[in-house]
Amino acid sequence: MTRTVLLLLALVAAVLAAPPERTFTYPLPPDPDEYHITQKFDHFNDKDQRTFSERVLVYDKYYKEGGPIFFAPYYKEGGPIFFCPGGESDVRGGYDHNGFMFRVAKKVGAFMLFPEHRFYGKTLPLGPVDSYLPANIKMLTIEQAIQDFIGAIDWAKKTWNIKNVPIIAFGGSYPGDLSAFMRIAHPDVIYAAHAASAPVYYRLGSLSGGSFFQVVTHDFGLSDPTCPGTVRHAFKQIKQAYADGKTDVLSTDLRLCEVPATQRLVDLWVENAFAQLGMEDYPYAVSGLPASPMKAACQAMKAGDPARSPLAQLADAVGVLYNATKDLKCFNISEEYYTCADITGCGGGVGDPDAMSWDYQSCTDLISNVDTNGETDMFPKALFNLTALTAYCQKTWNSVPQPYALLKRYDISKSRRIVYTNGKLDPWYPGGVLPDMLSRFPASADVHAFLIDGAAHHLDLRADVPQDPPAVRAARDAIEKILLGWLNQASSSSSSSSSSSSSSSSASASSASSASTASTKPASSLPASTLPASTHAASSRPADNAAPALAAPAGVLLAAAALLAL
């Protein structure tokens, strides 16, 4: 008896002394230094002398320590500049999501520079109110932002006394676009670029609009092919409820706090949920979402009482995004979805500066013709309507969308020394530069393209973790090899352009091989669809959430085994 009591006490002591359960925490990079530099409000008008403060994040520890000797003589002086342009949110999100950039930077002693995009994050040129006046918001253009970025590069080079070094641009999503645009338009500034999940071709006239939600639908059915069908049935119930004037069912089954006057707002709210789940379909828990959130949403739909209505099942699926905390009694659409020019979502809500800025850009140059067709996707048919978009933009911002202008200013066929990467789970991937498009570029272009199995929106730019699919790890290794090769070219000749051309033919050929290795399934592996042969916010968000691992402390197991042995 005494022995039993002692062992019970030992078990209790082991439980109390045991360390907490191990958790997976996404590995964030070391904290940056933050600076604020002066920029011109209008770089193209000398008469406008207004200035504003741009927030810039810097990490210079690798640079100060110097790069490895085997890159001599170039890296003895500290290394290249790795540059990431800010996107449609706070720049810290982009900083935290660029683990691959840090991985390579550490190896070559790179100086790391992250300037924030004007009109986003803390860089509101004239404050949260005056910045959005009609005369001021028109200064929110890609060209103005690029001039800010070039100014930030010049500031960094002067401040740290950095000489003539190669600058490689990294970016995912919109910053991926910007990285490619800067390499194309300013090759004298940007030596090379890694453009991840950059939907450069998702423009009117270049791609069928239905591709985005076709990928969403395909991904949603991967774990259970019946899940998209349940969503279609739910939308039929929503349509019937509005047609019959019996929308109470949307309160009871779909669990809406207030039922909108029109069905279209409900449709957009649901589509936004699946768009976000699709873009952030990462293999680990992050940003409040569970690991593999598309699979989790499908499982939530199928769990519980099988007799409940498709509407109730749909509520459980979108709740993976909108009710991640599981404490909401009902969904408040006005708080969860901000109606804007981009139907994939502008983030935030009414009055949120980032959302307002993205709405404006979606009304000027960044026109992605995303729509739903009700055939290759699981959503009600709502084709892209430039006339309706123009009416909205004129009313909201007094602007006229220019859907064809962007690709005229930044001719993607002139890409040189750029790695384009896309993930097969990313709804934006059909609008990216894909491996089967490499024939569009001359051999001397040294352009590489990867389509990566199991990867969601710019997963390849994120930090290495054990949960990464093998194809993602292989792609990162291949991309790193390409980047290091380019840096070696830069170090071996003062004329980087001529030195890179001599070996570009073999590099371009190897890129197709690398892409096929990274992606074992071709783009045509999607179901019969409208995806053309030439087949791509979401805002970046800090990745600091943890998912518990199922591991019992060893002390508890030993004490329990001893007790069972009595």
Image (cartoon, rainbow, N blue to C red):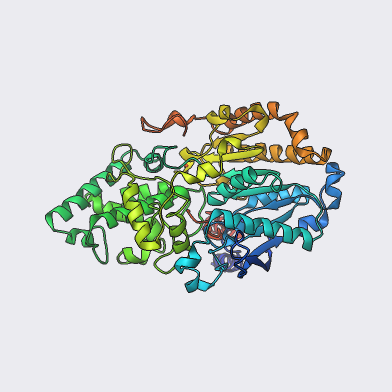
> Relative to residue 367, is residue 392 drawn left or right?
left
Q: Nearer the viewer, residue 228 or 188?
A: 188
Residue 391 drawn above or below residue 186: below
Residue 464 visible in this rendered orientation of the protein: no
Residue lying at the far front of the rendered structure: 47
Residue 216 drawn above or below residue 287: above
Count the marks. Answer: 0
> Relative to residue 464, is residue 141 drawn left or right?
left
Residue 175 place in picture, x, y as percent: 57, 51
> Relative to residue 70, is residue 460 drawn left or right?
left
* Residue at the image point whose x is 52% and y is 54% from the top: 550
Residue 360 place in picture, x, y as percent: 44, 59
Residue lying at the far left of the rendered structure: 244
Residue 481 visible in this rendered orientation of the protein: yes
Residue 531 place in picture, x, y as percent: 40, 33
Residue 256 drawn above or below residue 498: below
Residue 62 place in picture, x, y as percent: 77, 55
* Residue at the image point whose x is 71% and y is 46% from the top: 188
Q: The C terminus appears in which quarter of the rendering?
A: bottom right
Q: Nearer the viewer, residue 3 or 304?
A: 304
Q: Nearer the viewer, residue 289 or 17?
A: 289
Q: Nearer the viewer, residue 139 or 162?
A: 139
